[in-house]
Image: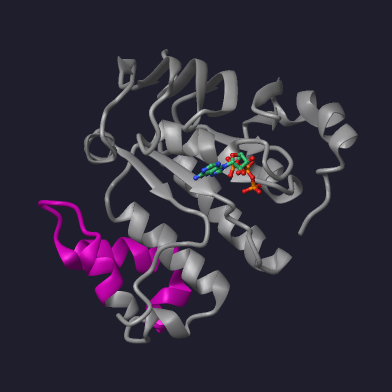
Amino acid sequence: MKPILELVGVTAGYGRIEVLHGVDLALPRGAVMALLGPNGAGKSTLLKVASGQIRATAGHVHVGGAHVNGASPDALARAGLCTIPEGRSVFPNLTVRDNLRLSTYAGARAADVYGTAFDRFPRLAERANQLAGSLSGGEQQMLAMARALATNPAVLLVDELSMGLAPLVVRELYEVVAGLAADGVSVLVVEQFADAALAVADRAAVLVHGRVVATGGPDEIADELANLYLGSVT
Ligand SMILES: Nc1ncnc2c1ncn2[C@@H]1O[C@H](COP(=O)(O)OP(=O)(O)OP(=O)(O)O)[C@@H](O)[C@H]1O
């Protein structure tokens, strides 16, 4: 079966600065893939190319087998691609419930969306009427994930899921990620620190200076990670 998301020989950057130098990456359907690498390697840039925010200057991007170079972020979102950017994305002055209501996909009943979100994240259910800005960092990341899931995505792209969060919360979030994959959602998650992501990942890729230097199962990239000192948890 074709990968749900595939980058072939992708080159991209900002103006005349090239950041990705011919990247190949394949996210299998229903898999969790960890995209690892040091600061500045180009991980966020790769997510931006995949989500249509930056256009590849060479190579190809495929979603569900269709060529999508140059497709707008909106069009890709309609095709089932959803991004949780670095630093999360919640409306701080709205309640948890209203944050969810605003991201409900066309045709869905708000009650169903709340139900699904609150089943996956019981902590959000207890705080349904609390302003998002007053949630803890981990709860805000849960809400950002719940909002993304309310769009019923086929592919979830997550930038730095664990940023600034305690290891226990990170583990809890990754358990949700594993559950999503079990339900058929394909997840590509960027991390600077590897352990928590690799605990649930089926596949991993290591990006260094805009090039994939290793790809495969978590065991297969272990040596490369050890060389880069990325194997410790936040
Ligand atoms: N908007 C921009 N304009 C110019 N250069 C940029 C822009 N965004 C990122 N870059 C540069 O692209 C390179 C890759 O950045 P990117 O954010 O993709 O790396 P990263 O692997 O996600 O790093 P980090 O883990 O620090 O977030 C860096 O050298 C960065 O300075």
Q: Position of residue 173 (x, y in %)?
A: 57, 59
User: Can residue 115 be seen from the camera position used here?
Assistant: yes
The main secondary structure of the magenta stretch is helix
Q: Is residue 90 left or right of residue 100?
A: right
Closest to the observer, 209 or 104: 209
User: Which residue: 21% across, 62% down?
Assistant: 112
Q: Position of residue 115 (x, y in %)?
A: 29, 66
Outermost residue, left side: 107
Query: Where the N terminus falls, by quadrant?
Result: top left
Quadrant position of ligand 1: top right
User: Which residue: 88% across, 35% down?
Assistant: 226
The vertical placement of 6 against 129, above or below, is above
Residue 158 is one of the magenta-drawn residues = no
Q: State the image quarter where residue 200 is shown.
A: top right
Q: What is the number of callouts on the image?
A: 0
The vertical placement of 216 against 227, above or below, is above
Q: Which stretch is magenta?
A: 98-127
Query: Where the C terminus falls, by quadrant?
Result: bottom right
